[in-house]
Structure formats: C-alpha cells, structure tokens
Image (cartoon, helix red, strand yellow):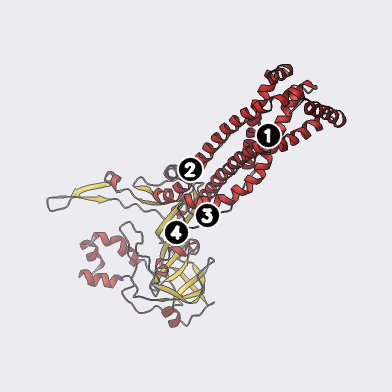
C-alpha cells in the first residue's frame, strides 16, 4: 500500500466514520476486514468449523448416551430377587442327634408371604416388578378332568405310597409330611387345580417356549380375566365370555368366591408336567396343568385366598446403587436375615458400560480437538495481527480509540464463529448418530434422536464465544501495548 492509497483509505474511513457513527462504522469495518483478508479468514474458518462440528458431535453423543442409559434404566433397571442366604443359614439351624451316631441340622422354616413381597415393592428404589403366585382353587360349578400325573397326590394316595393305615401312622413315619397332610385335611372336596397369577406374560415360560399356545381368544389384560385349557373348557361346555365362579381351597379360611371371565383358551403342545416346589415353598416348574386356570397376579392377590405360594418374584431397581439401599429398606420392613438380595449388575453393566465408554471417547476426542484448535487459532491470531499492524496504526492515528479497535476485532472473530457454528451445529448432529454406531460397534447408526436442551445449546454457544474471544485476544493485547506513532514508525 503506497502513500496515496493510505491517504485515500484514511480519508474514506474518516468520512464514513463521521457520517454513520462510531458503532456502525466499527461493525462495517469489521465485515470489510473479513473480505479483505479472505485467504487468512478461510483458514481460520476451516479450523473453527472443524472445532464447532466436533464439539457438537461430542456433546450430541454425550446427550445420546445419557438418553440411552436413562431409557435402559427406565425400561429394565437392575434385576433383583430375594433368595435364602445359605452361607449365613447355619446360625438359624438346630443341631440334633440323627439316631445313628451322627448329627443333623434342621432349619427353621421361614417363608415370605405374597403380601410381604407386594409391600416390599412399595419403594422408591423399585421401578417395576415381575411377580408369579399360585394357589389351589375349588369350584362347585366346574367338573375336573380325570386325575392324572399333573395333579398333586391326594391323602389316600399318600397313605398308599407310604403304606400307612391312618393319618397318625403316616405322620409318625414321615414327620416332614405333617404340614402337607394338614393342608390336605383342610382342603375342600371340590378343589380342582391351581390358579396361576402372572404380573406379566413374559413370565409364562410354557407359552414363550411354545409348549402352550392360545387356540382361541386372547391373553388376560385386566383383573378378573382367565385362561383355561381346551380340555377343561370342553368338559364344562365353556366358551369365550362365560363366567367361572371359584373360591380358595381351604375349608376353614376360604369362604368367599371370585367370578372370572373366560377370555382365552389354550392348548398344550406337550404332555403336562405338574408344578414342583422346593423346600422353601417356591414354585420351580412354571407349568399350568389342564385343570389349572391362568390369571393376572392382581387377580390372585385381590382374591385373598388363604394359601398363596409365591413363585418367581423379581424386582427391577432404579440404578446400580439401589440394591444396597433397597436391602436396608427390606430389613427395616421385616425381611428375615436368613434371606439376601440377589441382583444382577453384570447384565446392567454390559449394556450401560459401552454407552458410557462411547460418551467418554467422544468427549475426550472433542476436548483434544478443542484445545488443538484453540492453540492453532492463537498462532494464526499472532500472525494476523503482525500483518495488520499498519492498519491498526492508521486507525489509531485518525482517532479511533483502543476499545473501539478491540471491539472491531471481536466483531470479526464472532462473525466468523457465528457462521461456523450455524454450519457446524447441524453438521455435527447429522454425523453424531453414525459415529455413535461406530463407537458402539454396530452395523447401523444408533437409532436414537438427539435432543438438545437449553444447557447443551448454551454450552455450545459458550464454546463459540470463548473461541471468538480467544482468537481476537492477541490483537486486543497488541492494541493496548503500542501507541499509533510507534506502529507507523516501525512500518517506515
């Protein structure tokens, strides 16, 4: 730039400055400077675009992983069940002589009633439950199918099996049968089969394994709805929509009745196997026989039968920290120390950890790119201000204040940052899903919508502003350090 060009340029600036006012002049001059220095600003823009795109991708993947983890926790949670604590069981055992010169350990039977399982579920740490309970039912209106291996052996059968003439003799020979015999003596003669109550159809293993299937109707959806076998329906001339009246099997305790509506009829695709029970009274074989009825857990719980046996009782807890707190709450609610809380953190961790790793890798990469980009911007800013030193001297010589020059440089930087952010933000959102798919080692991009809340958007804006200020900071420091005459003298 020769002397005549400098004089013309200065006069034009002063004229514009006087006509349009300071603020307008500063902003207009900043925009003109962007066009005058296209080559340098294109390089800066590329760096800013890369930084803003990677920052957006990092924050998008972080938000995506948090959403996926939250969605998984809301849908499944940590699976937990209450089991006997055999490692700690000996303190509850009674040691006695077995009559053959040895010792035997007898454990006091401790059972958890269904009502207590339900009470345990009333906790802030429990997000969902899967419950199964069974109870023997009786009915004056239903005719049972012929006795088969699927039904429990009655009292006469026990007497025949153990070769006893009376109940007293049977108990004397087999004291461990006393409780079961007492139950048989208290059973109504009209007892037919068992009532199976499921809180969710996913617990119905025989249907899931295609050992049973619906031949008519649908699964139960509401309390008071029931599924019956084809054979029982045919024997009693029952069809969809018919009512069944049942009661509990206890002679002394179950006096009320329950009305059920037939909504489904199932067929068995394999020979029925009667349910078996462990010593703790929990059903282990989840298979309903042809005389059995299938209802919802709410139905069997509301029926309030005397003898209801808990089966698979599973809790889904809110997060990995919940099991210890939930167990403490269970103790306060009366859970016997003979039981422990068994929970599966491995399945939860196997799904959650890759999501957390994905977020960590993305955030680390984003930070590296951000720091590297900022360092490059500082370097380019140093080069830029050296090349524009004479321009700064001229503007200061014609009367522009230091803060006005600084504001102009900030305008330049923020204009570039704004443009790059407006391009980098949608580009980062577009690339976030396929990149997340690569990080999770899936063949397809993650099918998860990225939702930006005000906090994430404000963080992106803050990064953009910080980059804009940083890229103009060197120029501002230079302006405050030197006087215009010194700058012009150095130029000469």
* Residue 229 is a magenta residue: no
| Numbered disc 3: secondary structure | loop
Query: Where does the image place residue 438, in percent across and percent down from the top left?
Result: 48, 51
The magenta segment is 146-154
Is 148 a magenta residue? yes
**Which of pointers 1 and 3 lies earlier in the amino acid sequence?**
1
- How many residues crowd mark 4 within 10 Å: few (<14), some (14–19), many (20+)? many
Figure quadrant of residue 457: top right
Residue bearing mark 1:
413
Point out the frontmost of discs 3 and 4.
3
Q: Quick check: marks 2 and 4 in contact, CB under 8 Å?
A: no
Q: Which residue is mark 3?
A: 446
Helix, strand or loop at label 2? It is helix
* In-image side of 68 versus 283 (left or right): right
Spot the residue most to the left.
101
Q: Is residue 115 left or right of residue 473?
A: left
Name the residue that disc number 4 marks.
Answer: 131
Residue nearest the observer in this picture, 286 or 96: 286
Say which of marks 1 and 2 sits in front. 1
Could you tell me which quadrant the N terminus lies in? top right
Spatial separation of the CA atoms under disc 1 and disc 2: 30 Å
The answer to whether residue 219 is left or right of residue 249 is right
User: Can residue 459 be seen in the rendering of this structure?
Assistant: no
Residue underneath mark 2: 361
């Amino acid at each position: 730039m020769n002397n005549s060009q400098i004089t013309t340029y200065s006069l034009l600036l002063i004229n514009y400055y006087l006509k349009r006012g300071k603020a307008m002049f500063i902003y207009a001059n900043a925009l003109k400077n962007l066009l005058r220095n296209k080559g340098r600003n294109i390089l800066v823009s590329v760096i800013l675009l890369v930084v803003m795109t990677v920052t957006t991708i990092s924050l998008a993947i972080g938000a995506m992983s948090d959403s996926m983890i939250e969605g998984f926790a809301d849908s499944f949670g940590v699976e937990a069940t209450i089991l006997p604590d055999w490692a700690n069981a000996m303190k509850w055992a009674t040691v006695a002589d077995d009559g053959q010169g040895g010792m035997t350990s007898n454990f006091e039977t401790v059972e958890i009633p269904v009502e207590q399982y339900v009470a345990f579920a009333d906790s802030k740490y429990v997000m969902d439950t899967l419950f199964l309970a069974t109870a023997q039912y009786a009915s004056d209106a239903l005719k049972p199918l012929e006795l088969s291996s699927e039904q429990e052996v009655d009292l006469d059968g026990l007497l025949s099996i153990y070769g006893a003439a009376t109940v007293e003799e049977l108990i004397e020979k087999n004291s461990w049968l006393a409780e079961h015999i007492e139950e048989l003596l208290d059973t109504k003669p009209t007892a037919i089969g068992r009532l199976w109550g499921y809180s969710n159809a996913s617990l119905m293993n025989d249907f899931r394994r295609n050992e049973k299937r619906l031949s008519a109707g649908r699964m139960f959806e509401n309390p008071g709805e029931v599924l019956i076998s084809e054979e029982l329906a045919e024997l009693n001339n029952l069809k969809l929509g018919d009512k069944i009246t049942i009661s509990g099997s206890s002679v002394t305790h179950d006096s009320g009745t329950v009305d059920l509506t037939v909504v489904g009829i199932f067929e068995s695709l394999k020979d029925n196997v009667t349910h078996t029970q462990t010593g703790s009274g929990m059903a282990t074989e989840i298979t309903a026989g042809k005389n059995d009825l299938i209802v919802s857990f709410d139905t069997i719980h509301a029926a309030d039968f005397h003898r209801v046996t808990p089966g698979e009782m599973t809790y889904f807890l809110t997060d990995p920290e919940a099991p210890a707190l939930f167990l403490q709450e269970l103790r306060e609610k009366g859970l016997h120390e003979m039981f422990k809380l068994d929970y599966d953190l491995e399945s939860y961790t196997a799904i959650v950890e890759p999501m957390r790793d994905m977020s960590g890798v993305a955030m680390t990469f984003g930070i590296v790119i951000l720091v590297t980009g900022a360092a490059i911007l500082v370097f380019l800013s140093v080069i830029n201000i050296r090349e524009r030193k004479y321009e700064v001297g001229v503007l200061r010589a014609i009367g522009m204040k230091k803060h006005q020059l600084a504001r102009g440089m900030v305008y330049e930087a923020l204009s570039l940052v704004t443009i790059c952010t407006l391009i980098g933000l949608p580009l980062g959102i577009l690339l976030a899903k396929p990149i997340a798919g690569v990080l999770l080692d899936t063949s397809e991009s993650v099918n998860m919508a990225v939702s930006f809340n005000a906090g994430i958007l404000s963080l992106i804006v803050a990064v953009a502003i910080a980059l804009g200020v940083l890229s103009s900071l060197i120029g501002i420091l230079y302006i405050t350090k030197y006087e215009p005459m010194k700058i012009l003298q150095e130029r000469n």
